Image (cartoon, rainbow, N blue to C red):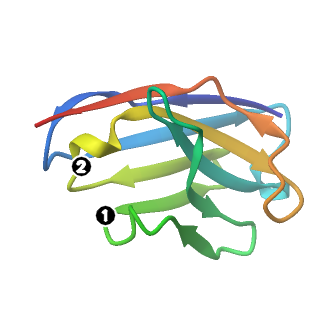
Amino acid sequence: VQLQASGGGLVQAGDSLRLSCAASGRTLNNYNMGWFRQAPGKEREFVAAIRRSGTRDYANSVKGRFAGSRDNAEDTAYLQMNSLKPEDTAVYYCAAGELNNVWNYWGQGTQVTVSS
């Protein structure tokens, strides 16, 4: 499966953005979807998971502000990011996998920059 992330940009603190992850090659129904981010000088970290079952998990740092969703008919996953903070600045990646917490496929990343 190929993944294409989009929707990043430069926003101010408190603004919202919605990231999209379009899948091609295989139907999204078969995969758990995840969002990760990597800030400059830091390791990549987990942000959210939207599983095939419909369950969702979030990193503590984004709980209550970010919401993951998926549209299997459109083979697209989304990450709605509200109340953005400067510390959310990072390259955001989407990922897919068939096994729980195993991410075999990665998109190319989209830059999110939040100014204070």
Give the SS element for disc 2. Answer: loop
Whether the residues at callouts 2 and 1 have beta carbons within 8 Å, the answer is yes
Residue 52 locus on image (x, y percent): 75, 67
**For marks 2 and 1 on the same chain, the one whose residue lies earlier in the sequence:** 1
Q: Residue at x 70, y 66 (%)?
A: 51
Screen quadrant of the N terminus: top right
Q: Amino acid at mark 1?
A: Arg
The numbered dot on residue 65 is 1
In screen coordinates, is 7 left or right of 30? left
On the picture, is 30 further left or further right than 116? right
Residue 115 lies left or right of residue 46; in this view the side is: left
Name the secondary structure under disc 1: loop
Return the residue nearer the eye: 61 or 7.
Answer: 61
Question: Which residue appears farthest toward the right when viewing the image?
Answer: 99
Q: Residue at x 84, y 31 (%)?
A: 25
Residue occupied by mark 2: 84
